[in-house]
Amino acid sequence: MNPGNPQPYALTLDKFLSHAAKWHGGREVVTGTASARTSYAALSARSNRLSGALLALGLHPGEHLATLAWNTQAHMECWYAAMGVGVACHTLNPRLTADHLAKMVRQAEVRVLGASSGLAPLVEALVALCPTIGHVVLLDDGPASDAVPDVRGARLWHLDQLLAVHGAPAEWGAFDENMPAGLCFTSGTTGDPKGVTYTHRSNYLHTAHLLQADVMGLTCEDVVLVAVPMFHANGWGFPFAAPAVGAKMVLPGRDQDGASLARLIADEGVTVAAGVATVWLGLVDHLDAAGGELPSLKRLLLGGSAVPQALMDRLEQRLGVTVQTSWGMTELSPLGAMTPATAKTRVAVKSGRPPMGVDLLLTDEKGVALADQRGGEGRLRVKGGSVVERYFGQTEKATDAGGWFDTGDLATIDADGNLSITGRAKDLIKSGGEWINPAEIEAIVGGLPEVALAAVVGRAHEKWGERPVLIVEPRAGAEVSDEALLGALRGRVANWWLPDAIVRLAAMPLALTGKIDKKRLRAEHG
């Protein structure tokens, strides 16, 4: 007897926008910076024509389109245009230096770059370092003061010009669901950047995780402000989740100051907003100074650094909202856990529970599962259909023999299944939701002739979560000024990586192994 079977239906990401266009076609996508307003139906049609243009530029399924852009309608169009025809979207962080970005672009062999206006110097530097880039597409029109980048031998296009010349309908989703859909490099790893590839299937499943009632639980009635950058692990998945349910999307562009966000929330009737805590601190600071209320806003979804309890209380009380905290990683697509909107008690250190489809495991240092998974502290490992198995371009798996990915975090899980991150096995510093790699700062400062030893540790900061502190042991008889130390870093690391404080020690504390004792440094100077 033939047992029968369901229809083949590949889990490809174009289906989210196509669904929104067909069933929620009049719902809007609004970009704050340029006051641009479109509908899902119009965005889908324009994205599909852009797919044809990208194919005309010579892109093929399996290749990468890089984007260096803010949260705008045009950026979203690029995503669906690329992904719809099997081209992976490689998001780049404009806050990193050209040298950092060039390592990623060269590894991904990018030939086409889409960039927001206002980033001309970074675009020029990146193109100069990446000879494979043959086309640069300016995605949106900024202020008249924005310079047009000199892209040397590459062809420069404006998005509307590219559509006028090469725009054509294209067939979406005509490929396997395991094709790459996105590539995001995590700056939170030591050494060279590590790329995380998202497939259509993994992002489709991740979207299903987000839409569970105890996670984000979005509906077609919601108006969602996406203040988390789209270059941060696919904007936490909002560009997929919002159209999947037909929620109105509000994209802030490059203006994320408190006044701009308050105006967007009020004008567009935002009900749900997502971003790192520092963004919302700027919002409440503005409201306290200028006055005003935001009655439409019901929920804030926070990620990035741990949220101080005092800040979470202030946000809930001043805005009259429910705050949902979360934990995730680029390697998880990125959701690992989130507090439900219906949670009876809210504690900032709690990151919530994992959605169905993500599993957590606490182990000892050797990877052996703790006998009691509740209450004890262990090394956190994760498994699921949206969790990395192998980094981009690497042959070795990133998972253990049991298929578990080691996050490098230390954590506890309480009796109710709530996850709390208690520390990081690595020395990385998370500032305002962004990773800072101490090793890079230490290598530069340690190379100065006046410095014997250098170390960087994180110090708790009310606004940014953590900020770096530079600790140096000068060479015998040598003196080095703060300005000389900071000057050595400027231009070689991003400005926001620069240490907030500098400490000089006559002798750097060393552990028994002879390495710098960072545990002691954190206790004394963190």
Image (tube, rainbow, N blue to C red):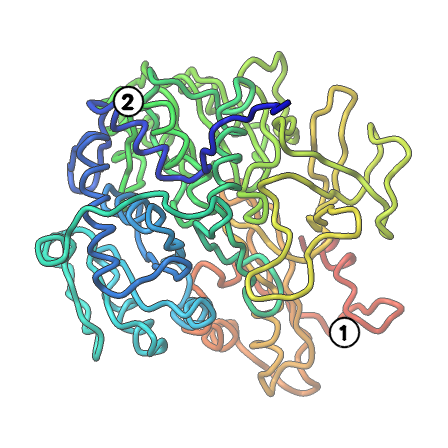
Frontmost residue, 150 versus 118: 150
Instruction: Name above or below for residue 471 compared with residue 355.
Output: below
Q: Residues within 10 Å of mark 1 (few under 14, many from 20)?
A: few
Numbered disc 1: secondary structure: loop
Q: Quadrant of residue 43?
A: top left
Left or right: 368 with respect to 394? right
* Label 2 sits on residue: 291
The N terminus lies in quadrant: top right
Q: x and y percent of residue 150 in the render? A: 18, 73
Q: x and y percent of residue 81 in the render? A: 28, 48
Count of numbered marks: 2
Q: Could you tell me which residue is drawn at 79 percent across and 46 percent down?
A: 402
Q: x and y percent of residue 489 in the render? A: 48, 73
Cα separation, mark 1 vs mark 2, equals: 51 Å
Left or right: 79 with respect to 31? right
* Label 1 sits on residue: 507
Query: Taking the image as drawn, is residue 235 in sight?
Result: yes
Instruction: Name above or below for residue 25 compared with residue 425.
Output: above
